Amino acid sequence: MTSHRSGLSKLNLKTPFVDDLKWQLALEYSGIGMWEYDAVLERVYFSEGSKKIIGVSDPSFGSDPYAWNDRVHPEDRALYFKNFQDHLKGLTEMYENEHRVRCEDGSYKWIRDRGQIVEWDEHNQPKRLIGTHMDITSQKQNQDTINNSLLIATEHNNKLKNFAHIVTHNLKQHTGNFESLLEFYEESNSPAEKEEIMTHLKTLSTSLSKTIKNLHDIVNVQNSKSNETKRIYIAKQIDHILELLDLVITENNATIHNNINKKIFLYFNSSYFESIIQNLLSNAIKYKHPDRDPVISIDCTKDKNEVKLMITDNGIGIDLDKYGKDIFGLYKTFHHNDDAEGVGLYLIKNQIESFGGTIAVDSEVNVGTTFTIIAKTKKPNTLPGF
């Protein structure tokens, strides 16, 4: 329920809803509150049912005409006031709005607020409105759950479609090459040519095996199980990974700073975590700047629900204006390295998302790159796959 702020008087709480008492009681037994707005006296009354919804026990609640209005969530206020004024102006047959209201304990509840003009003055102006408050928090939460489930299902469906396109494209390309080489082999009468074609066939076979392995790895990520998670102390695990990378670190004269508090942990698959960090650190060293030794910093912050892990290097960087949309795409490469396959970052993203996390990148050419991973601190109950 809303009202104009200018000229509002204090409320008279002694004579509300006299002629509607039986209806008020019937509604409040159903958990629905009532309100009344007197446009002439510019006063508001909230029934006990309305006050109960938001946990108010103070009998004088409502003596301030803005007692309810000021509790409306800031994001909902504009539409809240507009819907009420539209009804006063005759633009709508009934006032109706759904908004969040701050309860006495500081939490918010969703309210379906409905009302209608029931009396006009001699100038045909609204004189009196009566309405109801209904707590729809549970319905909103259920709807959010349904929406989230639909979003997850849609995302998984899109992943499945993309994966199917990738498999079709890659296998079709390989089978086409095989068919062409076999035709050349059958048509050739020269032993030297046949030997050369056989060499190409072996190379193609190796490439096909590698492609199938990459696709198999992706499927394994998508089919990960929640019981594979464990509590990982991030600093300790990264120290272990640095030991595994000791040779490549030494050969490239790289410096890696593990700045993470030893008490910070998260729930994750340990094999995935090792793979993710090892890939990101290896890339940071591989794509070092030609004019300086690699320096990599690993930092982490933690709040109640999540950890933010940042890996920052001083390498050659990535042109995000050019490649930003394809950073985590499969078979997308951004540097002219012979061993670049465009699989690593795609797998990393899928591994992180499989456990409810996210990864983002910030980079500047010839300055460096920062990968930011956000992961949950609580053990997940279920994990999304395809």
Image (spheres, helix red, strand yellow):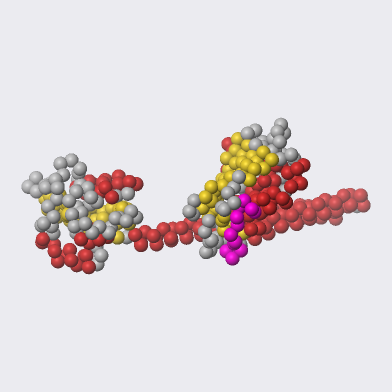
Provide residue 144's location: percent of width, then percent of height: 41, 58
Q: Could you tell whether 63 is left or right of 105 in the image?
A: left
Residue sitting at the far front = 262
- Taking the image as drawn, is residue 188 in sight? no
Q: Could you tell whether 14 is left or right of 150 in the image?
A: left
Q: Nearer the viewer, residue 303 or 159?
A: 303
Q: Could you tell whether 374 is left or right of 239 in the image?
A: left
The answer to whether residue 35 is magenta is no
Provide residue 132's location: percent of width, then percent of height: 22, 58
Provide residue 178's location: percent of width, then percent of height: 78, 54
Provide residue 45's location: percent of width, then percent of height: 17, 54
Q: In which quadrant of the rendered image does the C terminus lie?
A: bottom right
Count every numbered label the image shows and give the total. Answer: 0
Vertical arrangement, residue 81 with respect to residue 51, above or below = above
Residue found at x 71% / y 57%: 213
Vertical arrangement, residue 316 with respect to residue 355, above or below = above
Quarter of the figure with residue 183: bottom right
Residue sitting at the far left = 122
Q: Which residues are magenta?
A: 225-237
Q: Nearer the viewer, residue 98 or 103?
A: 103
Residue found at x 29% / y 50%: 72
Q: Could you tell whether 295 is left or right of 303 in the image?
A: right
Residue found at x 59% / y 65%: 227
Residue sitting at the far right = 191
- Taking the image as drawn, is residue 64 in sight? yes
Residue found at x 56% / y 52%: 264
